[in-house]
Amino acid sequence: MLRHARSTANRSGVLAGRTPGIGLDETGRGQATDLIGRLAQVPLAAVVRSPLQRCAETVQPLSRERNLEPIVEDQLSEVDYGDWSGRKLKDLVDEPLWRVVQANPSAAVFPGGEGLADVSARAVAAVRRLDAEITREHGEHAVWLLCSHGDVIKALLADALGQHLDSFQRIVVDPASISVVRYSSMRTFVLRVNDSGGSLESIVPKPEEQ
């Protein structure tokens, strides 16, 4: 689970949401290129991304290197923040809803947008469906990459950890970080969270695990 690399909105402290035209800044473009090396030892069966521009730009260098056409999945898109989209984060902290988002996110519904509980439901359903499809096509130990957004990935990790959505604000997911979850028929295994370091070779299933 890859959060998109640093965007122009991340740099300026704006809640981008689904605002069109938000791409990567210079740092983000470098992070996107670095993914080629970080994942060099990881065989990828598929690359799946949110439909938003910043995710497309993040996976583009890696996808070209691997000759993998990304699968665009609408259900992994950014939260629809509605009327909050495009506003400065420093201004939003004074909104009454801000406290709900931080302390009781399962009850948070953005004005003119969607609720975080709905975001969690759509994202979890999409990932489990995609994992099942990729497993059927490529085998039980297939590794695939999804590129999405901070709150979406935090919701996915909360689910994988067996935590209530109200705990998801305890999880940190930085731009260009990678978190790793292994799905199985019995349970999920969380192998990495918010990894911004080097090679991820160790996440590849070993021969004795296959």
Image (cartoon, rainbow, N blue to C red):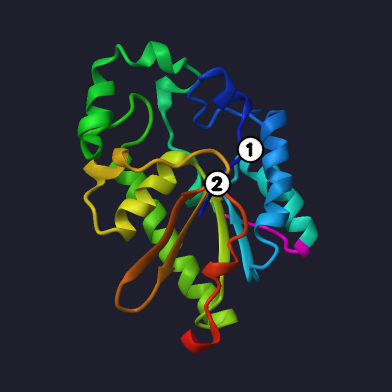
Question: For numbered disc 1, what is the local secondary structure?
Answer: helix
Q: Which residue is drawn at 78% across and 64% down?
A: 67
* Left or right placement of residue 92 versus residue 107 in this view: right
Disc 2: CA contacts within 10 A as few (<14), some (14-19) or many (>=20)? some
Depth check, mark 2 against mark 1: the one in front is 2
Q: Which residue is drawn at 24% across and 43% down?
A: 167
Q: Give the range drawn in magenta.
A: 66-72
Residue 24 in view (yes/no): no
Q: Which residue is drawn at 57% across and 18% down?
A: 12
Q: In the image shown, does 54 or 35 lie closer to the viewer?
A: 35
* Residue that mark 2 sits on: 196
Amino acid on which the number 2 mark rests in the picture: Ser
* Residue that mark 1 sits on: 54
- Would residue 67 be counted in the magenta stretch? yes
- Quadrant of residue 107 within the rendered picture: top left
Q: In the image shown, does 143 or 81 lie closer to the viewer?
A: 143
Residue 80's spot in the image, x, y percent? 43, 34
Residue 182 in view (yes/no): yes
Residue 84's spot in the image, x, y percent? 41, 21
